[in-house]
Image (cartoon, helix red, strand yellow):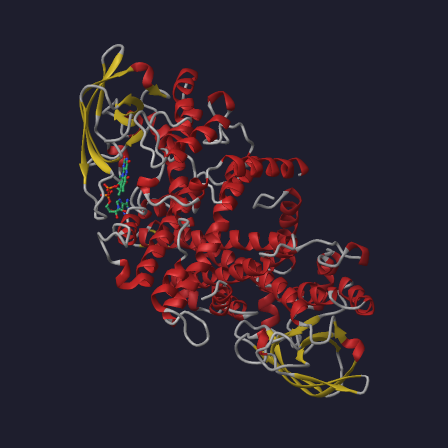
Amino acid sequence: MPLYLDDQQSMLRDSARAFVGETAPIAHMRGLRDAKEPKGYAPALWKQFSEMGFTGMLIPEAEGGLGLGAVEAGIVLEEIGRNLTPSPFLSTAIGAVEALKAGSAAQRGRWFPAILSGDAVAALAIDERAKHRPAATALTAERAGNGFRLSGAKTFVTHGHVADLVVVAARTAGRAGDTEGITLFAIEKGAAALHAEPRRLADASIVADLRFDGVEVSADAVIGEIDGGWGPLTAILDSVRVGAAAELLGVGAGAMDMTVGYLKERKQFGQTIGSFQALQHRAAHLYAELEVARAAILKAQQLVDAADARAEEAVMVAKAMAGLATTLAVQEGVQMHGGIGMTDEYNIGFYMKRGRVLAESFGDTDFLADQIARRAGY
Amino acid sequence: MSDLAGFRAEVAAWLEENCPAAMRQPARGDEDMCWGGRNPVFSCPEQKLWLERMAARGWTVPDWPREYGGGGLDPAETKVLRQEMARLGCRSPLSSFGIWMLGPALLKYGNEAQKREHLPRIARGEIRWCQGYSEPNAGSDLASLATRAEDRGDHFLVNGQKIWTSYADKADWIFCLVRTDRTSKHNGISFVLFDMASPGVSTKPILLISGYSPFCETFFDDVKVPKENLVGELNKGWDVAKYLLGHEREMISAMGLGEAGVPLPEIALQSMGRDDRGLLDEPVLRARIALFEVRAAAFRAMSERFIDELKAGKAHPAQPSMMKYYGTELNKARHELIMAAGGSGALDWESAASNGGAAARAWLRTKANSIEGGTSEVQLNIIAKRILDLPSA
Ligand SMILES: Cc1cc2nc3c(=O)[nH]c(=O)nc-3n(C[C@H](O)[C@H](O)[C@H](O)COP(=O)(O)OP(=O)(O)OC[C@H]3O[C@@H](n4cnc5c(N)ncnc54)[C@H](O)[C@@H]3O)c2cc1C
């Protein structure tokens, strides 16, 4: 398969670009932020995502979805990134759907229709500390009667305060640090003894800290095998990491487009600042970094869709590289705008904030590079 | 799709059968590569055999048309051949400026007679070419070149000097930029081919910081070049020159993929060992290597994407500049890390154990990557103007 978008994917990109650009441009995000909208996303927009078929992109056709893959989901995510659109798309249509693929028929029957219709929003509860360390899962799930009792805490759970479904990674055996002994649970909104504390982040998105004070769930809530959650968790992480990479790329590309546009407009010393070679070289270097990140992301998406054994590592490379490239893009973006780049009124700063949040999500560049090194045996 | 799978199986079987074991190991530096030419130097008989077998199938230039000695493969098939050669560790049978640079330019700009005369010989490795572009006063500003070619009826009379001409002392022919009109800078340049054995051509090797002298000063003193050796139109050589540079940059960008050999982490492990967690016992270097490997892996994907887009006509025409810039800067970073990983062991210059100072010499050689074929700064200028459309000063 050649490493570029095929005709159908290019058409999807064009329609996604037009749709997200028109219905949810940066002004939409700014509006939610200024209104201190407590949900952190717009349900009406999520309904429109559903009407476009986006919420069911990864749901198999036999179950009512489009049966598409990581490449197509990434196309939508790149536009979400470019427009800084607050959306439950990544956690719901990608993370939760991937989790439910490992779930029972009953779980799929319960959630796929609600995700398809844009009625349900889902959250992924994985991290427990300030840095992403999935194997370090310590939140415990003890056997209790016919089910389990969950105790512990999760953090950095995007949409966790409004989610209808929370996918939780819990420890049923072994110790924090072991990949064995993790079990995934599907927990419905309103479970007793589950407390969500919303926190607004620098980019105006809202995440929740979740406290599980002995949350009782039936055995039906288990996704996949008891103690065998690492396999499906890895699949979930592959899908959301490569998804976050695509969204990051959109953020970086959006920041770069805005910046290059500004270089062609702003005049100082009687000339457009884009004619200064010092800035030209930095912009050209940035272009190269983003192109390389784009290639790494598409490669990873294709390998994920082909269920290739090299996919997991390629996803780590993609997310790590996207972190490097976009972090550069947003910093150069603010710097090359000068004073106006520091103002809240101007949009470039939003890219910087969103880029930072995404770079931190599901493993930052440092964590992923370390993982890659371990896999290579050093 | 199934056709391609069948082709893959066929290619794999043929390579297994025909690629000698000695050619399934990476070349040890320039000297161990096969450059062909009138007086070819083969480092072993297998090298000769491998070249002959691949040339017979047209697979030294798999995507060139069959009538010019190529394999006539389409982009997908070419990719399969490349992948299978990489998978089985088969060396490239022939290193050649003819393949990398002149061939593509002749395919586009050459006339039928020129294609028939030169392309099959390039494909079979019979003629070794060198590139006469740079001059003492025309480097980055290449179009200011001054080597003159005067019209003398049936031939041009060429006088002047080139510099940094790689392998000029070993090459059989040269593709050369000459000035045929002094009244116009870019529209006064012509692209000519001539035999390095022509009377009036002389070369003088220049020693590099690596201790090797692969390039030369090249002098032309009343060299007669037959008119039929003009490629493209008179005074329109700059178009040919730029097109060729795109291919040269594409080729140089492959440096970013790194050579087959001891992997960087392995070199570091040999020098420093492991800590009690089994990780490289030098955490800062380990982190630098790990971050480098992220970029290196991403660049491999970029390289695949670039070739796929190029073959499908989807690549931006200036994209080779981006590839050249990124690939060469990456390769320099790799060799800095190789030196750090090897420590004092990588500093040897002569010992047999160090293979004649291979690590240090390779490190120094890579510094030229971001100079040859147009410097990094020149590539950034091109990206800024042609891709980002930024204004000139
Ligand atoms: C190993 C090696 C092999 C080579 N092989 C060949 C060969 O086979 N044939 C051939 O023809 N040539 C060859 N070259 C020559 C090569 O193409 C030139 O060295 C190169 O184009 C740079 O020219 P220069 O050396 O004159 O440097 P200069 O052009 O003098 O550059 C000096 C410095 O100024 C910078 N600079 C120049 N102009 C600008 C600008 N507009 N903006 C910003 N910075 C600028 C450069 O980037 C560089 O850092 C080879 C060079 C090397 C090192």
When the figure is inspected, residue A301 is found, relative to residue A171, above or below; the finding is above
Q: Nearer the viewer, residue A225 or B181?
A: A225
Q: Residue A189 location in percent, x, y? A: 75, 78
Extreme residue in the top direction: B153
Q: Is residue B368 visible?
A: yes
Give me the residue at 66% from left, 84% from top.
Answer: A140
- Callout count: 0
Q: Is residue A349 visible?
A: no
Q: Which image quarter is the N terminus of chain B in?
A: top right
Q: Residue B42 location in percent, x, y? A: 34, 33
Q: Is residue B57 left or right of residue B381?
A: right
Q: Is residue B65 left or right of residue A71?
A: left
Give me the residue at 68% from left, 81% from top.
Answer: A172
Q: Is residue A145 left or right of residue B97?
A: right
Q: Which picture quadrant has residue B200?
A: top left
Q: Nearer the viewer, residue A177 or A331?
A: A177
Q: Residue A194 location in percent, x, y? A: 71, 85
Q: Which picture quadrant has residue B347?
A: bottom left
When the figure is inspected, residue B88 is found, relative to residue B42, above or below; the finding is below
Q: Which quadrant does ligand 1 occupy?
A: top left
Q: Residue B345 location in percent, x, y? A: 27, 61
Q: Nearer the viewer, residue B244 or A300?
A: A300
When the figure is inspected, residue A143 is found, relative to residue B98, above or below; the finding is below
Q: Is residue B184 left or right of residue B259?
A: left
